[in-house]
């Protein structure tokens, strides 16, 4: 037994006072934490459920905008004069938000250039709102912005982002999307040639060689014309850099495989950008949520009718080139489905993490879409809310990098295999370093092709 002895009555008073101060301090901290939690989960704050950006003319077309001031005779495949950005939010009332347009470098670093960010024509709060068809829906309002318009005028070519901010808290964007603006100063001819690569798994070694010839009649300086960035249509988070700039080339290291690249020629006579040994991927899997009998409107999770199987290089249905199609969904059925993905690896367990990626998450790999392996059922599983539409998707593998908060070692062949018959459209953007207006990366040409030839 411990007996405390006090020298005088003041010592005992000190201990009592300190005890009550300790209790008061802890209570204050506790109340503060509660208030912060209440603030973090404030139901009045808008929560963005999903967003997408596409051509106003056709939702199958990519977000490539042609500068209206450019009337040159150069070909710009797949480009349009107006884009639509839409985003679904959960909020008691239409939120008080605004959109901001930001010019970016070739590798999507936001430019801090006052000449490129016009304070008058680079933001708008003119957002069209429509309510969800059901009160208890996963989202409550859909906002739409069509641009350019009287408020939004984009005067410079290059990579752009649209970001949505809350007027009450504009420190972080609620959502963002990428798009491209082209000032055509060159013609681009792209060719896709069947090739082989060395897969790490027992799959078909189908690879591709992609060459793009760039020819211009403008007075271009060769040292500023040194980069082409290649994307699969609608997959804007997976760039392949072909450049004389090694810092850009190093960004290709996030993929599991290495791709030899080459830049040859001169600007005045024509330049060629070449990349080899790109895995051909497989045709996209199809998820058609427009069938209400198969995917009814209920709040409970809905399993896929059949589990997906690990593929080695086959597909049984032609896809939509990675796009999301909503044209067959009526307004009364335009909701979200809580879907459980099931992937049967046929006894194969990956050493990497397995992710679902598709048009329902804008082809973005992140931790929210990582599957877990059910050892009892021997399936990979994931539950997520999916907007009712016809979707394209794949299963990817990779490893989460906690330092950079990104996914590295990305590949698709482990769960999907490869085939030279996949009809993916590849789009190449040609960048030119402009020195006017403080300097920026401009897109001066676009090339597009699939295995059947160039896309106009």
Image (cartoon, grey):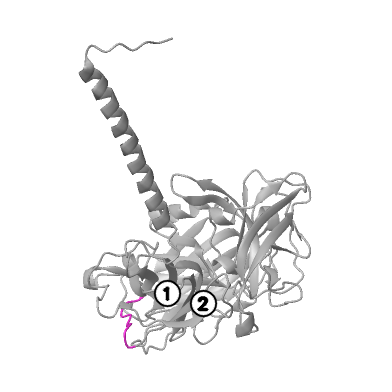
Which residue is denoted by mark 2 in the rendering?
62
User: Going 32% across and 65% down the picture, which residue do you hit?
Assistant: 170
Q: Earlier in the sequence, mark 2 or mark 1?
A: 2
Q: Magenta segment, which residues?
A: 150-157
Q: Is residue 126 above or below residue 162?
A: below
Give the image location of residue 66, x and y in percent: 41, 83
Main secondary structure of the magenta stretch? loop
Circle 1 sits in a helix, a strand or a loop, which is it?
strand
Residue 180: image tag = 1
The Cα–Cα distance between marks 2 and 1, rounded to whole angstroms, is 9 Å
Determine contact: label 2, label 1, CB under 8 Å: yes
Left or right of 30, for residue 11? left
Quarter holding residue 166: bottom left
Left or right of 208, for residue 228? left
User: Going 71% across and 74% down the picture, which residue do you hit?
Assistant: 318
Q: Is residue 334 above or below residue 281?
A: below
Q: Nearer the viewer, residue 102 or 327?
A: 327
Visible in this render: residue 417? no
User: Going 29% across and 68% down the picture, which residue do you hit?
Assistant: 440
Residue 359: image tag = none
Q: Is residue 295 above or below residue 151?
A: above
Give the image location of residue 447, x and y in percent: 50, 76
User: Going 37% across and 47% down the picture, which residue do you hit?
Assistant: 31
Q: Nearer the viewer, residue 178 or 195?
A: 178
Examine the structure image and report whether residue 151 is included in the region drawn in magenta.
yes
Left or right of 314, for residue 361? left
Visible in this render: residue 397? yes
């Amino acid at each position: 037994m411990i007996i405390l002895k006090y020298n005088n009555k003041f010592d005992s008073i000190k201990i009592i006072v300190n005890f009550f101060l300790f209790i008061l301090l802890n209570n204050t901290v506790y109340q503060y934490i509660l208030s912060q939690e209440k603030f973090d989960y404030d139901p009045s704050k808008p929560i963005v459920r999903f967003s997408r950006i596409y051509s106003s003319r056709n939702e199958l077309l990519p977000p490539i905008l042609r500068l209206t001031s450019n009337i040159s005779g150069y070909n710009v495949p797949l480009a349009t004069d107006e884009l639509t950005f839409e985003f679904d939010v959960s909020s008691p009332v239409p939120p008080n938000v605004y959109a901001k347009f930001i010019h970016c470098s070739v590798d999507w670093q936001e430019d801090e250039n006052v000449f490129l960010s016009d304070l008058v024509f680079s933001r708008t709060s003119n957002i069209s709102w429509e309510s969800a068809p059901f009160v208890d829906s996963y989202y409550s309002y859909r906002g739409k912005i069509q641009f350019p318009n009287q408020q939004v005028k984009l005067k410079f070519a290059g990579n752009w982002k649209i970001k949505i901010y809350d007027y009450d808290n504009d420190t972080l964007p609620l959502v963002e999307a990428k798009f491209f603006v082209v000032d055509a100063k060159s013609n681009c001819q792209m060719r896709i040639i069947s090739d082989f690569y060395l897969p790490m798994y027992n799959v078909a070694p189908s690879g591709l060689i992609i060459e793009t010839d760039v020819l211009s009649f403008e007075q271009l300086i060769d040292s500023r014309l040194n980069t082409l960035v290649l994307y699969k249509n609608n997959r804007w988070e997976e760039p392949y850099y072909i450049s004389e700039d090694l810092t850009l080339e190093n960004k290709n290291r996030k993929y599991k495989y290495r791709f030899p690249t080459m830049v040859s020629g001169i600007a005045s006579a024509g330049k060629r950008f070449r990349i080899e040994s790109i895995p051909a991927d497989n045709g996209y899997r199809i998820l058609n949520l427009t069938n209400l009998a198969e995917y009814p409107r209920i709040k409970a999770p809905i399993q896929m009718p059949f589990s997906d199987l690990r593929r080695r290089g086959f597909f049984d249905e032609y896809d939509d080139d990675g796009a999301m199609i909503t044209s067959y969904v009526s307004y009364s059925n335009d909701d979200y489905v809580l879907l459980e993905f099931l992937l049967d690896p046929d006894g194969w367990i990956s050493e990497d993490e397995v992710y679902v990626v598709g048009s329902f998450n804008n082809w973005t790999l992140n931790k929210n879409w990582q599957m877990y392996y059910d050892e009892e059922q021997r399936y990979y599983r994931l539950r997520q809310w999916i907007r009712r539409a016809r979707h394209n998707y794949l299963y990817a593998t990779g490893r989460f990098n906690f330092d950079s908060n990104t996914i590295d070692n990305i590949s698709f062949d482990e769960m999907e295999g490869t085939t030279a018959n996949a009809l993916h459209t590849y789009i190449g953007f040609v960048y030119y370093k402009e020195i006017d207006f403080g300097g920026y990366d401009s897109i001066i040409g676009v090339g597009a092709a699939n295995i059947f030839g160039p896309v106009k």
